[in-house]
Image (cartoon, rainbow, N blue to C red):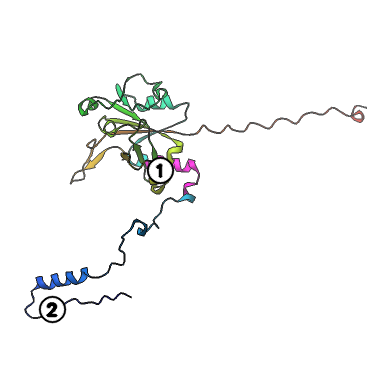
Amino acid sequence: MSAWQDTRPSRVAGMSARDEILARLRSALEVPRRDEVTEPGDVPRTYQRADDRAEGSDPAKIRQLLVKRLEDYTATVHRTTEAGLPEAVAAALEGAASVIVPPGVPEAWLASSDLSVTRDDGTAGPRALDRIDAVLTGCHTAIATTGTIMLRSDDLSGRRAISLLPDLHVIVVQADQIVLGVPRGIERMGEDPTAPWTMISGPSATSDIELSRVEGVHGPRRLHIVIVEPEPEPEPGPAPDAPKTAPTSQETS
């Protein structure tokens, strides 16, 4: 039991409202805090980190949920396999004449694209980036529940500026980069907690006080997501015919 006693002053004749309020504040500040945290070990750690049971559900259903959320945000989704990735990237970049890519983007991703490619070396400023039609990046994590694509500032996702200034952003998402919920996404961010992170949920859009939607104010107006899914399992063929046995001597007589 705390030894603290309620000593809040009572209103008496001649005491102003200001004095009463200040006296009550002084008394309240003397109350011991039940939730006081003084050491890192005292911080409660009961919050949800990841729902392992849900995360272990059918990966195809998790990918489908991501597609639904992305389409809700008016993003365009292309679903393909590794073999069809160059064609899917070319389709996503259709209409663009130039594209900038981070240094770690594989050449194979652009094998079917016929446009001017710039490998970002960090020297292009805002005006130069604004003259480029599109940007192609990879990603670090995609959260299906919220439809959020998480970019880490590395050789595959690039620096933040290149994902903000071109009008079209194409992001390649591998199947093993897709998680179900935010806790698992935050857990994956813990792999590099000091890195700059960019979280994207749909194309850039905002609304004014009259709720008029304006796109492209804070980033690309168009967002295309290319999801690379596993190769489909081959369908089982017809069962082979049973081998014919040679007739017995009784059958031939």
Task: Judge whether residue 96 can be spotted in this image.
Answer: no
Q: Earlier in the sequence, mark 1 or mark 2?
A: 2
Rounded to the nearest angstrom, the CA distance separating label 1 from label 2 is 57 Å
Task: Report crowding for label 2: few under 14, some 14 to 19, many 20 or more residues within 10 A (C-alpha).
Answer: few
| Numbered marks: total | 2
| Residue 175 % position (x, y) | 45, 36
Q: Which residue type carries mark 2? A: Arg
The quadrant of the image that shows the C terminus is top right
Position of 9 compared to 137: left or right? left
In the rendered view, tell whether residue 82 sits above or below residue 26. Answer: above
Residue 70 lies in what quarter of the image?
Answer: top left
Q: Relative to the observer, which residue lies in front, 44 or 158?
A: 44
Residue positioned 56% across, 33% down in the render: 233
- Residue 15 belongs to the span the image colors magenta: no
Task: Judge whether residue 47 can be spotted in this image.
Answer: yes
Residue positioned 27% across, 69% down in the render: 32
| Residue 39 % position (x, y) | 33, 58
Kindly identify which residue carries mark 1: 188
Q: Relative to the observer, which residue lies in front, 30 or 19?
A: 30
In the rendered view, tell whether residue 209 sits above or below residue 14. Answer: above
Residue 208 lies in what quarter of the image?
Answer: top left
The label number, if any, that marks residue 149 in the structure image: none
The reply to whether the C-beta atoms of the residues labelled 1 and 2 are less than 8 Å apart is: no
Magenta region, main secondary structure: helix
Find numbered disc 2 in the image and state the secondary structure of the residue it sits on: loop
The quadrant of the image that shows the N terminus is bottom left
Kindly identify which residue carries mark 2: 11
Q: Which residue type carries mark 1? A: Arg
- Residue 60 belongs to the span the image colors magenta: yes
Q: Which range of residues does the magenta coloring cover?
A: 54-69
